[in-house]
Structures are given as C-alpha cells and as structure tokens.
Amino acid sequence: MAPSAIAERTRTTRELGSDCTDVLKRIITWTQSQNLYYLVKGHVEATIGALDDVRVVDVQLVMCDGRQRRGYTTNNVRSVIVKLSNEGVITVGVEVMYVTSEVIHLAGHKKAKEKDDEPWYVYVVRCADASLYCGVSKNVENRVKEHNGNCRGAKYTRSRRPVTLVKQWRAKDKSDAFKAEKRFKKLTKARKEEICSS
C-alpha cells in the first residue's frame, strides 16, 4: 500500500481523544446505555476523523416529544446532537433500541437518511414471568429475536427471557405506532390480556 494511502486511512479512522469521549460519555450517565454511546461515538469518529483540530464540545439528547432532556431511557431518545468546536453539528437519529435511522452532518458533510417506506408495527410479547411487553418495530420477527438473544433487547425483557410474540398490528406510520404503544402501556393488565387474546 502506498504511503499516501496509509496516511489517508490512518487520518480518517482516527479515534477520539479522551476530552471528546468524556463529553460523549454523558450519554451513558443520562441513559445507562453503553450501546447508544458507542453508536454515537462511531458516527462522530467517522465524521471528524478526517478533520484536523476538531473536538466534541457538547452533547444533547432530543426526546421523542421533541424536548431536550436528560436521564431518560433510550426508548425515549429520538436523536443525539453532538456539537463540535468548529461550530459544526452532528445529529444521530435513533430508532427504538439504538438502530440508526438518520445521520446528519452539518459541517460540510452529506446527509444520509434511511428509506422510510417500510411499514411500522406495534407488537406485544409475553415474558417468561407471564408479564406483557409492548414495543414498535419495522421487523417484528427480528425484534423478538433481539429481545431473546442480544444486547439490543429492551432492558425490561433482558431479565424475563424467553419472550414469545402474542400480538402484532400494523400502524399507519411511525408516529401512529409510538402513540399506539403508549396507549397500550397505560391500559390495565386485564385490558391488555383481553386485547392479546382477541
């Protein structure tokens, strides 16, 4: 490999310094999620790895209701905003449980957005302790596997494995899916069981 190619590769994959990672680690403090931290860190490294003397100066969470808050679970996080020393901003949009849906680079970089033409579903699984858990996903089958098998499963279901799918229904769009999930979670246990048995 030519020296110039090696130099370019090294320059674009440069890891963040401790001053930058310390700022990003606020994500772990606020959400208790190392997965979300590593997701955002990866996008930041990919973006500023090729930029000299650019540091992370601040990080903010934007919740599903649009407000900027701290101390909430990752289920409520819609995006993470990372502010840079060159006044650039990186916004990492987050689907349910850490799946990247959008990365916007406003420091002279391109915007990449996931296609949003797949339908959204609301689903209910029964946990090993007989409790019910409701969530939303574009791929319910894969989501149930995540609940049963890896770190992308919801915090609630991790200690209640295995889970089995008992109900799912298609929503009009992403917003409708989240609203339906919220309504379901407010129902009584008896009403939830009634819906799942119908």
Image (tube, rainbow, N blue to C red):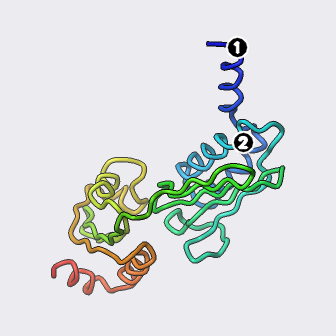
Q: Nearer the viewer, residue 149 or 42?
A: 42
Q: Position of residue 14 (x, y in %)?
A: 69, 32
Location of the C terminus (image quadrant): bottom left
Q: Amino acid at mark 2?
A: Ile
Location of the N terminus (image quadrant): top right
**Circle 1 sits on which residue?**
3
**Circle 2 sits on which residue?**
48
130 on left or right of 82: left
Q: Is residue 59 above or below residue 7?
A: below
Q: Amino acid at mark 1?
A: Pro
Identified at 71% across, 29% down, the residue is 11
Q: Nearer the viewer, residue 96 or 31?
A: 96
Closer mark to the observer between disc 2 and disc 1: 1
Identified at 75% across, 52% down, the residue is 107
Identified at 82% across, 55% down, the residue is 87
Q: CA distance from mark 2 to mark 1?
A: 22 Å
* Crowd around label 2: few <14 · some 14–19 · many ≥20 (10 Å): many
Labels 2 & 1 near each other (Cβ < 8 A): no
